[in-house]
Image (cartoon, rainbow, N blue to C red):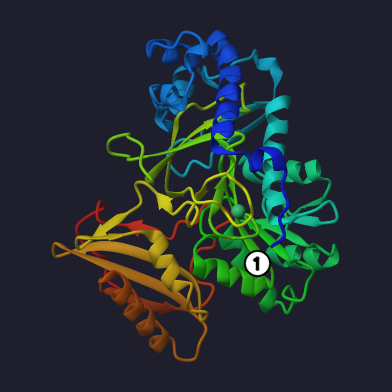
């Protein structure tokens, strides 16, 4: 197997030595943070931490309190405009981005020159692991707004010396044309958009399958680690599809290597924990908690990401010692829907629907009717016999989840498309007690 590393020393280091490096970096960060960052100074002093040297092990770190998104947004509301999680004077910061606001008010995140370089290095790790080289031409099929993800990816492309081509302000048709025109070899976008762009190209008879694209990197939302979605993207683009995971508040923390066997945690730049969300105790399957080590100006310490993941510590075929998440981020901690007593994760539905190549976009709605939960799927189908496909999808869902769902075919192109953070699941049970007549 081809293996390329961003930093072969760190990425293959034994667990004990790696932990020592993480602790060293954490202590170095805590120095200025305990000194001048009023948010963490107060929080950590209250928790009894006065000096970085008091953190001698990961167990000591685990004694510190978690940080939540609500806390950070609350802090920005009380200390307008950027909150008090700032280690340096305002003039040291050179970049501002914000979270997508899918889970509450958008949070503003500031970077200094140093931490922006750190972002670029983290993204360089993502590229190197996927086998992207300075010879590559990377296309970013994304509108460059205040969201951080693709800006950092763009900076990372420069860091490894590849040619970055921004695809902001373009229609999907123009993007597909540009990919051929510039001989693009790497596509970076969300998994949803990779499929949508392939669909548009096919309609417009633009041969993206025959293009030079041989690597796609999927960012901005989970999905590319789901076997059925990955397979679909790889077939549509005739390329290898790599999942990437990160967050505006945290950094670009996860990447897939060429073994494509789970998402590696970049443990050289982050301390990653998985906890039981109910008890806060360490777990192998639960909520991902992150401490970033290179964003001194606006750090997060033991930040509850809300991402659900399963830790895998066995060594990877690629030779990296960094732990992996099996199946990447498998969802949000709070996004399991309980339908008639069955726990339904959006990712399980997606993995079933994507196996049907006749099906394009899809949407799931859950209603309550006469005190009974009802799950309804709308699926876009182009086939001559949509009812047949719909009943097959319904059967698969019943077999896999033990749950009856109404599956309704709708014409192709009628469901919403998403540029970032697809929202295909709607729970109407809180709205009212009736289902609109269909
Ligand atoms: Zn690996």
**Could you say which is closer to the camera, residue 309 or residue 25?**
25
Residue 426 is left or right of residue 53, and the answer is: left
Residue at screen point 49% across, 26% down? 301
Position of the N terminus, as image quadrant, is bottom right
**What SS does tag 1 mark?**
helix
**Could you say which is closer to the camera, residue 435 or residue 349?**
349
Which of the 4 quarters of the picture holds residue 302? Answer: top left
**Residue under label 1:** 197
Position of the C terminus, as image quadrant, is bottom left
Residue 302 higher or lower than 86, as above or below: below
Residue at screen point 38% across, 79% down? 393
Residue 113 is left or right of residue 223, and the answer is: right
Residue 353 higher or lower than 287, as above or below: below
**Would you call the spot at circle 1 few (<14 residues within 10 Å), some (14-19), or many (20 or more)?**
many
Residue 264 higher or lower than 362, as above or below: above
Residue at screen point 67% across, 77% down? 202
């Amino acid at each position: 197997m081809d293996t390329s590393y961003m930093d072969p020393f760190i990425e293959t280091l034994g667990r004990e030595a790696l932990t020592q490096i993480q602790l060293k970096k954490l202590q170095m960060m805590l120095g200025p943070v305990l000194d001048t960052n009023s948010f963490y100074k107060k929080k950590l002093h209250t928790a009894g931490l006065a000096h970085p040297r008091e953190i001698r092990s990961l167990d000591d770190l685990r004694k510190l309190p978690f940080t939540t998104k609500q806390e950070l947004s609350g802090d920005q509301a009380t200390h307008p405009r950027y909150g008090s999680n700032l280690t340096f004077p305002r003039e040291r910061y050179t970049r501002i981005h914000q979270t997508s606001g899918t889970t509450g008010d958008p949070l503003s995140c500031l970077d200094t020159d140093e931490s922006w370089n750190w972002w670029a290095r983290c993204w360089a790790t993502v590229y190197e692991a996927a086998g992207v080289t300075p010879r590559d031409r990377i296309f970013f099929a994304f509108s460059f707004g205040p969201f951080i993800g693709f800006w950092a990816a763009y900076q990372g492309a420069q860091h490894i010396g590849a040619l970055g081509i921004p695809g902001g302000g373009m229609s999907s048709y123009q993007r597909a044309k540009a990919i051929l025109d510039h001989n693009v070899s790497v596509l970076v976008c969300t998994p949803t958009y990779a499929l949508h762009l392939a669909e548009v190209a096919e309609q417009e008879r633009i041969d993206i399958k025959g293009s030079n694209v041989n690597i796609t990197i999927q960012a901005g939302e989970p999905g590319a680690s789901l076997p059925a979605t990955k397979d679909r993207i790889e077939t549509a683009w005739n390329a290898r599809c790599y999942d990437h995971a990160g967050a505006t508040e945290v950094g670009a923390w996860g990447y897939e290597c060429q073994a494509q066997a789970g998402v590696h945690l970049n443990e050289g730049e982050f301390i990653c924990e998985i906890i039981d969300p109910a008890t806060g105790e360490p777990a192998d399957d639960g909520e991902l908690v992150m401490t970033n080590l290179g964003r001194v100006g606006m750090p997060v310490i033991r930040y509850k990401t809300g991402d659900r993941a399963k830790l895998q510590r066995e060594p990877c075929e690629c030779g990296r010692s960094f732990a992996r998440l099996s199946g990447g981020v498998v969802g949000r901690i709070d996004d399991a829907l309980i339908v008639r007593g069955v726990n339904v994760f959006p990712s399980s539905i997606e993995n079933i629907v994507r196996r049907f190549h006749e099906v394009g976009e899809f949407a799931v709605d859950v209603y309550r009717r006469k005190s009974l939960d009802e799950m309804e799927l709308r699926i876009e189908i182009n086939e001559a016999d949509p009812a047949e496909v719909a009943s097959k999808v319904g059967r698969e869902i019943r077999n896999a989840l033990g749950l009856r769902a109404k599956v309704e075919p709708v014409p192709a192109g009628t469901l919403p498309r998403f540029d970032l953070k697809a929202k295909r699941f709607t729970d109407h049970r809180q709205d009212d007690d009736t289902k609109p007549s269909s």
